[in-house]
Image (tube, helix red, strand yellow):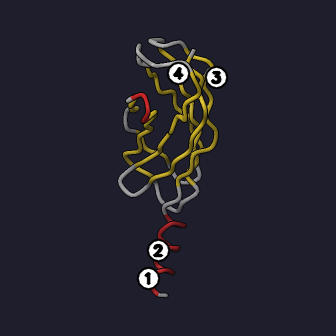
Amino acid sequence: MKKQLLAMFAVFLLAVFIGRIYHDDFVQSGDYFEVFTSYHNAGQHKAENLQLTVYIPELGLYTRSNTFDLKTGDNGGRYVLAQMPSDAQSGWYRMWVMLSGDQYRDYAFNWIYVG
């Protein structure tokens, strides 16, 4: 019980969350596309060394932003530029976005269509 309360308290102090994900719904194989992600620091401390990662496991797509910090209570947003693999087959794919740092991690996903 004590461990569980400590974990819940740590999450409250270190709470960084993904808000919304914006991107083109339709992308051609080989095209570059931007993914905009909003985020919020609801914790009690500054979040340092955060990074956004965009990946589509089925296609081997994996790209990251530069690192950044987020003050307590601040909102932010960042673009990540990715390139759809040229051999990507047409269809819908689950695109994962991860916001992570030294002590933080939040995941979200959205669907993207490759034509």
For residue 3, the mark is 1
- Name the secondary structure under disc 2: helix
How far apart are the alpha carbons under marks 2 and 1?
A: 6 Å
Whether tag 3 and tag 2 are in contact, CB under 8 A, the answer is no
Point out the tag, 4 or 1, that comes first from the N-terminus. 1
Q: Residue 4: image x %, image y %?
A: 49, 80
Q: Residue 64: image x %, image y %?
A: 39, 32
Q: Nearer the viewer, residue 11 or 90?
A: 90
How far apart are the alpha carbons under marks 4 and 3?
A: 11 Å
The residue type indicated by label 4 comes to Glu
- Name the secondary structure under disc 1: helix
Query: Mark 4 highlights which residue?
Result: 34
How far apart are the alpha carbons under marks 4 and 1?
A: 41 Å
Whether tag 2 and tag 1 are in contact, CB under 8 A, the answer is yes
Q: Residue at x 47, y 70 (%)?
A: 10
For residue 47, the mark is none
Point out the tag, 4 or 3, that comes first from the N-terminus. 3
Q: Residue 48: image x %, image y %?
A: 39, 49
The residue type indicated by label 2 comes to Ala
Against 103, residue 95 (above or below) is above
The residue type indicated by label 1 comes to Lys
Q: Residue at x 39, y 58 (%)?
A: 103
The residue type indicated by label 3 comes to Asp
Query: Mark 3 highlights which residue?
Result: 25
Point out the tag, 4 or 2, that comes first from the N-terminus. 2
For residue 7, the mark is 2
3 vs 2, front mark: 3
